Amino acid sequence: MNKKFLARNVVQDQLEGLDTKLLRRKLRTTFSPCDVKSNVDQRELKAFCSNDYLGFANHPKLIMAMTEGAKQYGVGSGASHLISGHSITHDLLEKKLASFESAHIPNARALFFSTGYLANITAITGLVRLVNQGEASIYSAALNHASIIDGVKLASAQSKAKVTIFNHLDLESLSTPLKNDQHPFKIIVLDGVFSMDGDIAPVKELIEIAQTYDALLIIDDAHGFGVLGKQGHGILEHFDVCSERIVYLGTLGKAAGVSGAFICASSPFIEWLIQKGRPYIYSTATPPAIAHALYASLELIESDEGIHRRAHLNELIDIWRTEMNFKRWQKMKSITPIQPVILGSNANALAAAKLLDEAGYWIPAIRPPTVPENSARLRITLSANHTIDDLRALMRTLEAIEQSIVHGG
């Protein structure tokens, strides 16, 4: 019996709408480890798109550590951390993570999560539960990552918190509404390194604002951890700051090369999240083998090899910043491995990505809603595994492609 299936018709119409706007995303399948040379859909491409900034994702020492961890602890944790899933290797990892930030957060303690998305939602929703409904305000940067945005929306829905959006490049847009805020509990939340623009949050000024208006400052340093700072401890080391008001989040699947994330804050805040952070309480713990590999990754980040890799990465960044020039496209002023090139229209970004693919490069087009309308781009990311020759070859290719594409709106 053929009956009208409304949901199917609606989803088909919506997908066709995405196609019309050149906004449908497509999966590509890799047949090789994450590295600067990747087998993508059975073709070898030079990858300038992953977040493996230090080139650790296929590092022999981390492969060995993962193998050793699986042999010692098995392949699953079996339950949430608060039931039976909290392994000694989770505990050791959290202590090591806390030591990374101990110079910047008094009485630092860390909590390990399976993803950065989960960590952000736990931090934001858990901390607003410190006060009664309607007593909290949340100040969120306009260009924050989707996981922060979703955490803010969920926290606001649950707690009736007032949400204000501010521009991280114009801190008057933050301090002005804070002056008139009568709520007893205030949270400022933003990325440390903005994932699509590559610029860095002004952390020193933000701490001063948090101090002035008695607010907590949540910093998601997903793209700074492992990269910024002499020892790779992230944006807090980069700015040499220390404050008990900071709730710091780091991602472990980017520069650290493995998987997961963590929250680091003064011990009472972490203890509260263990008690009231619902995503943490009700999620199965990450396999201990991953925590074991991450401990080895943290040692690499601090080692001479880690220092050398960051130095090479910074050399690549300097070459790009000083030598890469476009006539029509816009290059962002970033001092991080994230080096976006703004093309404007979805059509231009897709055309450039296609030409790059044909030239042997993997750099996907980034389009709305990931970035604002009319700011479609190539999000070029650099890795310590790239050579200077790799980078200069890409730069020559980009120069040729820019000349071949008719500039659109």
Image (cartoon, grey):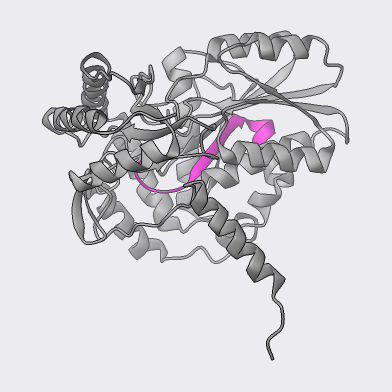
Asked if residue 78 lies left or right of residue 270, the reply is left
Residue 149 coordinates in the image, percent (x, y): 64, 37
Residue 160 lies in quadrant: top right
Residue 335 lies in quadrant: top left
Residue 53 falls inside the magenta stretch: no
Asked if residue 36 lies left or right of residue 287, the reply is left
Residue nearer the viewer, 138 or 321: 321
Q: What segment is highlighted magenta in the picture?
A: 255-272
Residue 27 coordinates in the image, percent (x, y): 40, 57
Asked if residue 301 lies left or right of residue 179, the reply is left
One can see residue 98 in this view: yes
Quarter of the image containing the C terminus? top left
Q: Is residue 94 above or below residue 65?
A: above
Residue nearer the viewer, 172 or 77: 172
One can see residue 114 in this view: no
Residue under the point 31% across and 31% down? 406
Residue nearer the viewer, 79 or 322: 322
- Tally of numbered discs: 0
Residue 120 coordinates in the image, percent (x, y): 60, 39
Residue 257 falls inside the magenta stretch: yes
Residue 14 lies in quadrant: bottom right
Task: Single out the residue that lies furthest toward the bottom.
Answer: 1
